[in-house]
Each structure stands twice: as structure tokens, then as C-alpha cells.
Image (tube, rainbow, N blue to C red):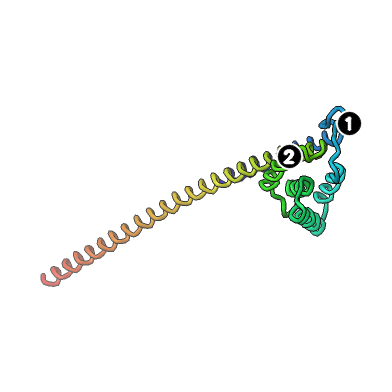
């Protein structure tokens, strides 16, 4: 059963690693321009929209920063999304939630917010659409991987519990058998003592 637990954890870790590596590869494609439109002029400017570089720099700081830096970035993105909710602030907060490596990482909420953002692409630049699409795909894969991890853990836990139940039942059966044997031994000793007493009485009479 111990080997089954190790196998489940190995599968889960491998699945998450593949998902994260896939997301990194897609982001590299975006940075090199392969995910952009062939015509730079096709990216219609959105008034007040941040450059893609701003999102990426912040995400890099979030991923590589210490806990204090990560908490500061998260709090700022969260307050921006709550106080002045629009496509850009919601996208920024969703990207923060979608970035692994900090305590507020939440792929489920990130995926939900990214779907809402992408439902109104007319309010996004092409770069923002690309960022949102890449991270949505990655977070969806992470959610699937996490569900598989949970399934494997539950299966391992159930198997361990079943094995423990079987072991407990066997122990209970052995203990019951031991009690029965002790009773029979006690009864046999009592009978032997009675027979010995009778024989002694007969000899004394003779």
C-alpha cells in the first residue's frame, strides 16, 4: 500500500509538472511574437490598457518574489479589481491568481475570471487576449490535474482504510479465537481437577 501511495504522488506530480511546463512554453511563444497576429497594426488600442510587458513584469516579480512582495502584488491586484472593476483590472487579478508559487494561487477562481474577461474581447488588446487565453488554458489543465491528484489521494486513502479494516477484522477474529481457547482450557483444567479429586477420594476409601 505504501508503494501505491508513492505511485499516486508520482503521477500527480508529473501531471502538474507537464501542465506548468506547457504553460511556460506558450508564454515564451507569446513573448517571441509567434502567438501574435502577423500584422502588428491589427492590435486595436484600448484607452488606458496596460502594455503586455507590464503584465509580464509583474507576473515575473510575483513568481520570483519573497512572500512580502507576493502579498503586496496580490493585495494591489485584488483591490484594483474590487474598487475599479474593468477588463484590465480583472485580467490583472486573474493573472495573479493563475500564477503558481504564492499562497493565494487559485486556479479555479482564475479560470472563472479569465472566462469572464474573454467574454468581452472587444475591451481587450490582442496582447491581452493572448495572455488571457494562454493562462486560461494552463489553469484549466491545472484544475484537471488537481482533480486527478485528489482522486488518486482518495483512492489511496480508501485502499489504506480497507486494508486497515481487513487487518482489524483479522485481529478481532484472532482475539475471539484466543478467548474461546482460553475458556476451553479453563473448562478442561476444571474437569481434570474434578477427576483427580474423585480418584484421590476413591484411593483414600480403599
**Quadrant holding the C terminus:** bottom left
Relative depth, front residue between 58 and 165: 58
**Residue appearing at x 85%, y 31% in the figure:** 42
Q: How many marks?
A: 2
Where residue 61 sits: x, y (%)? 84, 50
**Residue appearing at x 51%, y 46% in the figure:** 159
Residue 28 in the image: above or below residue 198: above
State whether residue 99 appears in this view.
Answer: no
Local secondary structure at mark 2: loop
Pointer 1 local density, CA inside 10 Å: few below 14, some 14–19, many at least 20? few
**Quadrant holding the N terminus:** top right
Left-right relation of 182 to 106: left
Left-right relation of 86 to 45: left
**Residue appearing at x 44%, y 49% in the figure:** 166
Q: Work out which residue is located at the far top of the displayed protein and give it.
A: 38
Q: Which residue is mark 1?
A: 41
Pointer 2 local density, CA inside 10 Å: few below 14, some 14–19, many at least 20? few
Where residue 112 sits: x, y (%)? 67, 44
Which of the 4 image quadrants contains residue 91? top right
Q: Please tell me which of labels 1 and 2 falls first in the chain.
A: 1
Residue 64 in the image: above or below residue 199: above
- Residue 191's disc is none
Where residue 69 sits: x, y (%)? 82, 57
Left-right relation of 37 to 1: right
Relative depth, front residue between 171 and 198: 171
Q: Which residue is mark 2?
A: 120
Relative depth, front residue between 165 and 139: 139
Local secondary structure at mark 1: helix
State whether residue 159 appears in this view.
Answer: yes
Amino acid at each position: 500500500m505504501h508503494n501505491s501511495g508513492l505511485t499516486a504522488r508520482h503521477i500527480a506530480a508529473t501531471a502538474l509538472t507537464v501542465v506548468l511546463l506547457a504553460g511556460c512554453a506558450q508564454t515564451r511563444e507569446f513573448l517571441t511574437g509567434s502567438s501574435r497576429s502577423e500584422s502588428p497594426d491589427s492590435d486595436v488600442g484600448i484607452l488606458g490598457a496596460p502594455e503586455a510587458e507590464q503584465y509580464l513584469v509583474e507576473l515575473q516579480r510575483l513568481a520570483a518574489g519573497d512572500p512580502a512582495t507576493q502579498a503586496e502584488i496580490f493585495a494591489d491586484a485584488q483591490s484594483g479589481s474590487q474598487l475599479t472593476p474593468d477588463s484590465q483590472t480583472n485580467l490583472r487579478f486573474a493573472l495573479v491568481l493563475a500564477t503558481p508559487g504564492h499562497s493565494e494561487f487559485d486556479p479555479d477562481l482564475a479560470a472563472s475570471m479569465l472566462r469572464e474577461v474573454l467574454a468581452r474581447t472587444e475591451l481587450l488588446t490582442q496582447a491581452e487576449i493572448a495572455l488571457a487565453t494562454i493562462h486560461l488554458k494552463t489553469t484549466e489543465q491545472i484544475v484537471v490535474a488537481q482533480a486527478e491528484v485528489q482522486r488518486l489521494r482518495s483512492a489511496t486513502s480508501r485502499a489504506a482504510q480497507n486494508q486497515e479494516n481487513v487487518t482489524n477484522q483479522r485481529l478481532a477474529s484472532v482475539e475471539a479465537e484466543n478467548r474461546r481457547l482460553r475458556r476451553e482450557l479453563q473448562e478442561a483444567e476444571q474437569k481434570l481437577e474434578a477427576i483427580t479429586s474423585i480418584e484421590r477420594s476413591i484411593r483414600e476409601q480403599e
